[in-house]
């Protein structure tokens, strides 16, 4: 890092988006990740699609 930075030309809120949605990262234990990765590969689907569908099913059952 530099000792000092010049922010005199900075614009406050330049990147602010009122309707922005943040996607929270989910950290899986290594053994769970390995199992899900194998299952996704066997089904020929991306890992995130598999995880989302499994969670959706679980949430529906609990409602």
Image (tube, rainbow, N blue to C red):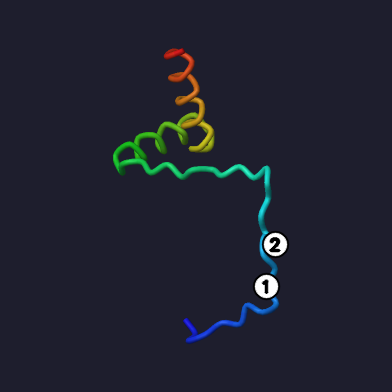
Query: Which labelled disc corresponds to residue 10?
Result: 1
When the figure is inspected, residue 16 is found, relative to residue 22, above or below; the finding is: below
Query: Which labelled disc corresponds to residue 19?
Result: none
When asked about the image quadrant of residue 9, the answer is: bottom right
30 left or right of 16 in image? left
Furthest residue in direction bottom, as rendered: 3
Determine the CA span between mark 1 and mark 2.
8 Å
How far across and down, in percent of the image, does residue 50 sit? 49, 31
Relative depth, front residue between 50 and 62: 62
9 left or right of 48 in image? right
When the figure is inspected, residue 32 is found, relative to residue 20, above or below; the finding is: above
Residue drawn where x is 56% and y is 44% of the image? 22
Mark 2 is surrounded, within 10 Å at the Cα level, by few (under 14), some (14 to 19) or many (20 or more) other residues, namely few
Residue drawn where x is 49% and y is 43% of the image? 24
How far across and down, in percent of the image, does residue 26 sit? 42, 41
Relative depth, front residue between 22 and 44: 22
Residue drawn where x is 47% and y is 36% of the image? 41
Relative depth, front residue between 46 and 53: 53
Q: Is mark 2 on a helix, strand or loop?
A: loop
The residue beneath circle 2 is 14
How far across and down, in percent of the image, does residue 47 sit? 48, 37
Asked if the residues shown at circle 1 and circle 2 are in contact, with their CB atoms under 8 angstroms apart, the answer is yes
Q: What element carries label 1?
A: loop
Mark 1 is surrounded, within 10 Å at the Cα level, by few (under 14), some (14 to 19) or many (20 or more) other residues, namely few
How far across and down, in percent of the image, does residue 59 sit? 46, 20
Residue drawn where x is 67% and y is 59% of the image? 15
When asked about the image quadrant of residue 23, the answer is: top right
* Number of residue marks: 2
């Amino acid at each position: 890092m530099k000792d000092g930075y010049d922010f005199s030309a900075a614009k406050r809120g330049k990147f602010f988006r009122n309707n922005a949605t943040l996607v929270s990262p989910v950290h899986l234990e290594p053994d769970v990740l390995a199992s899900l990765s194998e299952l996704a590969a066997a089904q020929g689907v991306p890992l995130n699609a598999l995880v989302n569908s499994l969670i959706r099913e679980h949430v529906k059952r609990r409602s």
